Amino acid sequence: MSDRRNSHEVNGDRAISSLGVLFATVFGSLLGPMFLVLTAMGIVNSGSGWFTKLDAIFAGLLTLMVACRWVEQRSGSATTAKGERATMQDFRRHVRSVLLIATLIWVAANLLGNHVLH
C-alpha cells in the first residue's frame, strides 16, 4: 500500500496529456541529443570551416532542445532525474549544463575536423 502511494505521489499528477509536450519531452531528451551527435560527426567528417551549414544546424538543434525543455517545464510535467518535480532552478541548471556540454562538443568537432584530421 505504501509503495503504491509513493509512486502515485512521484508520477501521478505529472502525466503528459498533450501531444506537443510529449514531442518536446522526447525530442529534448532523446532525439535532440542524438541528432546533435550526428551533426557533430558530420562537422568532423566535412572539415570545411568553423561556421558552415552544419554548424548552423548544430546551433538550431541546440536551440530546439532548450525550447523543448522550456515547453516541458511550462507544462508542469518536467521532472528531475530523481523523479521529483523540476523547478525553475533545475531548468536553469539543465540549460547551463546542456549549453556548456554542447559548446565543448562543437568546438572539439571543429578542431578535429578542421585542424587535426584534414
Image (tube, rainbow, N blue to C red):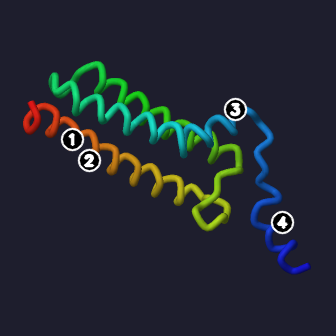
Residue, x 32% and y 50% (percent of image)? 100
Marker disc for residue 107: 1
- Residue 82, compared with residue 57, is above or below; it is below
In terms of sequence position, does the residue under pointer 4 or pointer 2 come before the other? Answer: 4
Q: Quadrant of residue 82?
A: bottom right
Mark 4 or mark 3, earlier in chain: 4
The residue indicated by pointer 4 is 8
Q: Sequence-wise, which precedes: disc 4 or disc 1? A: 4
Do tag 4 and tag 1 residues touch (Cβ < 8 Å)? no
Q: Which numbered tag is attached to residue 20?
A: 3
> On the picture, is 40 further left or further right than 60?
left
Secondary structure category for the residue under label 2: helix
Could you tell me how far apart the alpha carbons at marks 4 and 1 are, in whole angstroms?
Answer: 43 Å
Name which of mark 1 and mark 3 comes first in the sequence.
3
Residue drawn at point x = 91 percent, y = 79 percent: 1
Residue, x 33% and y 50% (percent of image)?
A: 101
Amino acid identity at mark 4: His
Q: Amino acid at mark 3?
A: Gly
Farthest-out residue, right: 1
Q: Residues within 10 Å of mark 1 (few under 14, many from 20)?
A: some
Answer with mark 3 or mark 2, whichever residue precedes in sequence: 3
The furthest residue to the bottom: 2
Whole-percent x, y for residue 20 in the image: 69, 32
The residue identified by callout 2 is 104
Inter-mark Cα distance, 3 to 2: 30 Å
